[in-house]
Image (spheres, rainbow, N blue to C red):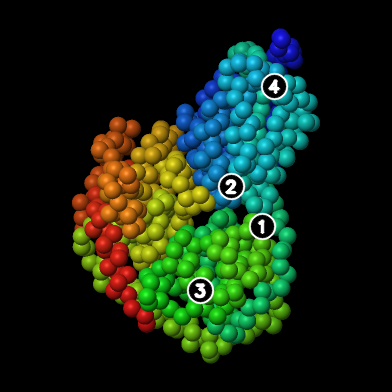
Amino acid sequence: MSLPPAVPCSAEANVRAALTLLRSFMDAGLRRLVLCPGSRSAPLALAAGLLAERGLELWTGIDERSAAFFALALGRHDGVPAAVVTTSGTAVANLLPAAVEADFGAIPLLLITADRPARLKGSGANQTVNQEAFLRASARCLLEASPTGLASQGPELIQALAAEAWRSSLAAPRGPVHLNVPFEEPLHASAQVLSALQTELAAQLLPQTLTSASAVLEPKAPQLSSAPGGLDPDQPGVVVVGPWRGTPAELKDFAEALGQWQRRSGWPVLADALSGLRGWPGLELVQGYDLLLNEGHGLPLAPQLLRLGPVPASRRLQNWIAQCGSSQLLITENDPRNLDALGCAACRDASGFQQWLRAWPASTWAQQPSPINLAWSRVWSEADLGVQRLLSETFGSPGPLSEPALAYHLSRALPAGLPVLLANSSPVRDWESFMAASSPHRPIHSFRGASGIDGTLSLACGLAAAGERAFLISGDLALFHDANGWLWREQLMARGIRLTVFVLDNQGGGIFEQLPIRPALDFERLFAMPQTLEPGPWAEGYGIPWRPLLGLDQLESVLQWALEQPLALVVARTERQADAELRHGLRRRMVAP
């Protein structure tokens, strides 16, 4: 049986259709596009190149997996989706890890993939894979252009397709959208056609694109529970704040609302390192809870618990929450999904913390914390002071190089306001436990929706590109896992963007040293998987300058050098077995207050 005939098309028609699609996204608020190489995606590439001259911020990446993580970080920065454009075939499969993280982390992301027309599917034609199904499980929605090719659709239908994709990515919960776009051949427009299109675009005034996330975000999800959740601000309770998944602008309003509740109730606030609240002016936080809630010791259970956002990273805090009974209210921001992984919240509310506060009578906020609450809060603050004294005694003066000590000193030494990305596994856990309470406020990121280590370096490059600078703290395996992340170097440097990478080289998976599995058969081979590659010379091969950190007494000078470079790598060699024992030893030294 012969194939159905192709719908008549021209290379110019394909580029014009692609221009209509991308301009429609720009009208909605698209500002940044990451382009991967390919032939079937040529109309989209040419359209992106033309629009790069009209205000579209264009990045190019040869590795689709790396490109998707780079775009993911751009969307995390301000809540505005960035687009990734790929060709057909296995290129689409490489988008899945970032799509999974975007799904669970509630990060907007547009994945635009070129495809063969439907007439070629199932015929043995090259690259006619079922790519429309690759991302289905993670995408908020799968949208497809006409199976006969994008150019066979009228401009109105293309504009409607872009509008639906944009809305779906930003609707609560925000997340990835997959737009699969077939193109019929011919794909490659001539120089004469492109010159004519340039002239045509120059003569037009493109609609003003949106410049802030607040202008394009969808309204918050409808309230699931209109009651204040049965909490009594005049009786003792605790606030637990999980990782923040909104934008910096939204965090400011959230922090002000939290301050309002704390001033009224006097409740202790336990804020995850990824909450964005540590060091926030005006908030009084208990930062040492991960050590205070040690097995066999700990603090009293909270008779009331106000939980804000996703579950925190600390396993000890999770266990404590699970023991606190059912007087728990869980409030989430812009995410109506069930985020009660512990299964112990008596009530869930997805309308957001500020909306919940507005349900209280205005007279509530004229009152002061009750004496019993003030006494309760003192128990927590005094215990936290004990943790800070322990950390100061242990790490206050330069001593042996260890990962807990580096978390303590880096949290104090890095400039205020410098965005920090903590790789999953040990870095994010050490920052949670050992960062100094005196640390200044700075944005702290970690992509723990699915908590993978893939894409770590590319995520850091994307965060730096979004905010012009960033600092990554990573283990050696996570860094090696995303080797192609260094390929963003030239584009970052050309735009004056700074990135410092600080690698904790413990010769393998240090996180596994903290689990009771070292006696396992051939632990090094089965779990730690040490690599013979040296991070410094490896990065140098990509043109990245590097320096070793040989002791804590060198930290200030090495950081000064690194932060002055456009891109730089600092390598700190640590001992994972000794560090695991140090962590356990610090917990053993903690006693109940």
Asked if residue 312 is positioned above or below residue 199 in the image, the reply reads: below
Q: Residue at x 70, y 76 (%)?
A: 360
Q: Secondary structure at mark 4?
A: helix
| Lower position in the chain sequence, tag 4 or tag 2 | 2
Q: Residue under label 1, please give it.
A: 336
Q: Look at the image and tell me in which quarter the C terminus lies.
A: bottom left
Q: Position of residue 488 (x, y in %)?
A: 43, 35
Foreground: disc 4 or disc 3: 3
Asked if residue 261 is positioned above or below residue 204 in the image, the reply reads: below
Q: Residue under label 4, please give it.
A: 118
Q: Residue at x 24, y 49 (%)?
A: 573
Inter-mark Cα distance, 4 to 2: 28 Å
| Lower position in the chain sequence, tag 1 or tag 2 | 2
User: Can residue 259 be seen in this snapshot?
Assistant: no
Q: Residue under label 2, please give it.
A: 103
Foreground: disc 3 or disc 2: 3
Inter-mark Cα distance, 1 to 3: 25 Å
| Lower position in the chain sequence, tag 1 or tag 3 | 3
Q: Secondary structure at mark 3?
A: helix
Inter-mark Cα distance, 1 to 4: 36 Å
User: Can residue 403 be seen in this snapshot?
Assistant: yes
